[in-house]
Amino acid sequence: MIGSKFKQNYKTIIGVTLLAFFLWLMVKMNQVYDYAIDIAIRYTNIDPDKILKYPQVDTVRVEFTGKGKDLIRLHFYHLYYQIDLSHAPLHLELDLTEHHEYVSSVGLNVKVKSIVRPRLLVIELDKKVTRKLPVVVKYKLDTPPGYLLMGVKAEPDSVEVTGPAEMFKKIKAIETETKEFKDVDQPLTEEFKIRQTTEYYSFIRPKKIKVFFDVQRLAEKNIPDVPVEVINVPPNLAVVPLPSTAVLYVKGGEKVLANLTAKDFRIVIDFKRLWRPIKGKVKADLITRANVLYMESHPPEFELIVRKKSK
């Protein structure tokens, strides 16, 4: 019988229950409460030639008092604690608890009861400087046997950094995030984020760079007929190296070696440094601007024929 009566009157029962709930909610929403939330700190009107020296606290916890319905609206407004730094000294200590008026609460029927934390804010300014700093790519790359990492190229290889003058006395380069790559057997291009320094307040542009890893297959090549040069010879002597040319055995990336010729190498003997009358054959210095892994000459040593020039 009870179930039958409920089915007959369930709409009335639900309606009365909802009405009671809304009446209770309206009473509660019109009562006064204290409520604390975190709001953003906004630093404004900094002189154009100045900048914050260090990263600052970016939120402040504020306790508000007001009716429940108004306190709920706090979450739908962009509230902030605004600090005006126009004509501020380089070192400023600000007691936030003494400046409730810095809290923006336009359109809300609430009041700031207290600043919970932080209570004291230390702000330091410095001369603003913009410079380009080189980028250091942080990575770990492994190649399988038979492959080599021939080079790493960042694009761009430097970034524009705006920060306090003191920062550039200590920081000479900007690092990227760290990435790891395993068993790379072909050229690779990867995007890296620039790591923001946490010690100083600064802006960096761009925030991302592309890095090219030149991975090549390991190769070897013989470079024939490379001339042997003798340098630092006294003007009264004539010196002839034997043999006068040599073969260079070179190891490196296959793409690098493919275009190398004898013109890309020098075999140099420093006569003043290496030659002695009783000394036999001498070794030469192998010089190249090519990005090669290993070089050796055949023959490995050279004989010098030394004669006095006729007057």
Image (tube, rainbow, N blue to C red):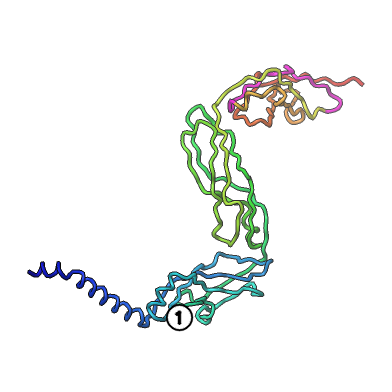
Farthest residue in the front direction? 8
Q: Nearer the viewer, residue 29 or 86?
A: 29
Q: Position of residue 8 (x, y in %)?
A: 15, 68
Taking the image as shown, residue 17 lies to the left or right of residue 117, namely left
Side (left or right) of 298 relative to 242: left
Question: 162 or 294: nearer the eye?
Answer: 162
Q: Is residue 258 above or below residue 51?
A: above
Which residue is disc 1 drawn over? 109
At a point 50% along the width and 41% down the height, the residue shown is: 140
Inspect the magenta stretch and tell me whether residue 91 lies in it. Answer: no
Residue 157 in percent (x, y) is at 63, 45
Q: Residue at x 52, y 76 (%)?
A: 104
- Tell me if residue 246 is in the magenta stretch: yes
**Residue 2 x/y as whole percent:** 9, 70
Q: Is residue 10 above or below residue 193?
A: below
Q: Position of residue 82 (x, y in %)?
A: 55, 73
Q: Residue at position x 21%, y 69% from top?
A: 11
User: What is the span of residues highlighted in magenta in the rendered image?
Assistant: 234-254
Task: Assign a secondary structure to mark 1.
Answer: loop
Would residue 96 be found to the left or right of residue 20 on screen? right
Residue flagged by tag 1: what amino acid is it?
Asn
Quarter of the figure with residue 238: top right
Q: Quadrant of the N terminus?
A: bottom left
